[in-house]
Image (spheres, helix red, strand yellow):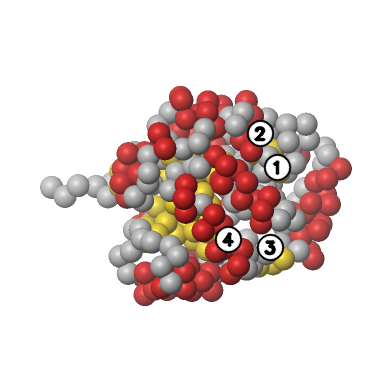
Amino acid sequence: MAKARKVIITCAITGSIHTPSMSPYLPVTPDEIAEAALAAAEAGATILHLHARDPEDGRPSQDPALFQQFLPRIKQACEAVINITTGGGLGMTVEERLRPAFELKPEVASLNMGSMNFGLFPMLGRFKEFKHDWERAHLENSRDFVFKNTYKDIEYILTSCRGNGTRFEFECYDIGHLYNLAHFLDRGVVEPPLFVQSVFGILGGIGPHPEDLMHMRRTADRLFGDAYQWSILGAGRNQIPLATIGAAMGANVRVGLEDSLWAGPGTLAKSNAEQVRLIRQVLEGMSLEVASPADARDMLALKGGDAVGF
């Protein structure tokens, strides 16, 4: 009998897209982030993708000292692979965005593979009341915001972390981002296996239609062959449907409150762990097996949890 294919579940615990007013369940303080991450790992998350927030008002922060308030606790309490953002928050310089990954040397860091219009302002039509002054402006300012990831920026992040042994979750929001990644692969700046996170449903990037997902897969197959591990991130209500389609096509999956606040139509997810359990139920119903952290370290050629800087 053939063995079940193993699927990596990445859980993005809290990010820069959603603001604290949008859901009472979004973790903000270091204690909340640690507790949410450990619950997600207990539910079956293989990789934990982590941002930090100012505990006073929930504003996105790339202060390594804030990451240090939850990373060691997570590392000591579970085996999950820890993945630190280099995306940061809107308007941060590339140097600010890199600091946590550069100083703390995680096994994995995220890396956006191209500049793009990053439109969060449609959320203003769905959320009317905000707790903090910065939140409305955070969304409104995205009408005139380009998320800058030039070739120089990307290479700066890649080469700065080379000595750390950190590998990357390459976040590709559009087809051109795959070609950007192929450029760095051809030059030898990155090495396989590539961990390609295809992102669908962010205004400014590729859409959430199943045909978009298939186009992304065909292009990645043509560019990278068997030199990559594919993963699916569907934003908002597209999270579980696109992850399901992707898993059926051979992908790994990403869920979490960074990407979607929902557990169903009109129903807020009460935790990251709830979303992990939802996608795990789908995977197991498809006779797929959730990859363990050890499996992921083998699949992605990671350096191991003992070789990090926290």
Say which residue appears at 45% left-offset and 33% top-offset.
Answer: 41
Element carrying mark 3: strand
Residues at circles 1 and 2 in contact by the CB criterion of under 8 Å: yes
Disc on the earlier residue, 3 or 4: 3
Residue that numbered label 1 is attached to: 61
In 3D space, how far apart are the residues under numbered discs 1 and 3 (Cα atoms)? 16 Å
Residue matched to label 3: 147
- What is the C-alpha distance between the residues marked 3 and 4? 16 Å
x 49%, y 42%: residue: 106
Q: Amino acid at mark 2?
A: Leu
Disc nearer the start of the sequence (1/3): 1
Answer whether labels 4 and 2 touch (C-beta < 8 Å): no
Residue at mark 4: 156
Residue 293: percent from the left, percent from the top? Answer: 36, 38
N-terminal-most mark, 1 or 2: 1
**Viewer-nearest of discs 3 and 4:** 4
Q: CA distance from mark 4 to mark 1?
A: 20 Å
Q: Nearer the viewer, residue 67 or 158?
A: 158
Number of residues whose C-alpha sits closer than 10 Å to that of mark 4, classed few (under 14), some (14–19) or many (20 or more):
some
Q: Position of residue 161 (x, y in %)?
A: 51, 52
Q: Which mark is residue 233?
A: none
Label 3 sits on what residue type?
Answer: Phe
Residues under labels 4 and 2: Cα distance? 23 Å
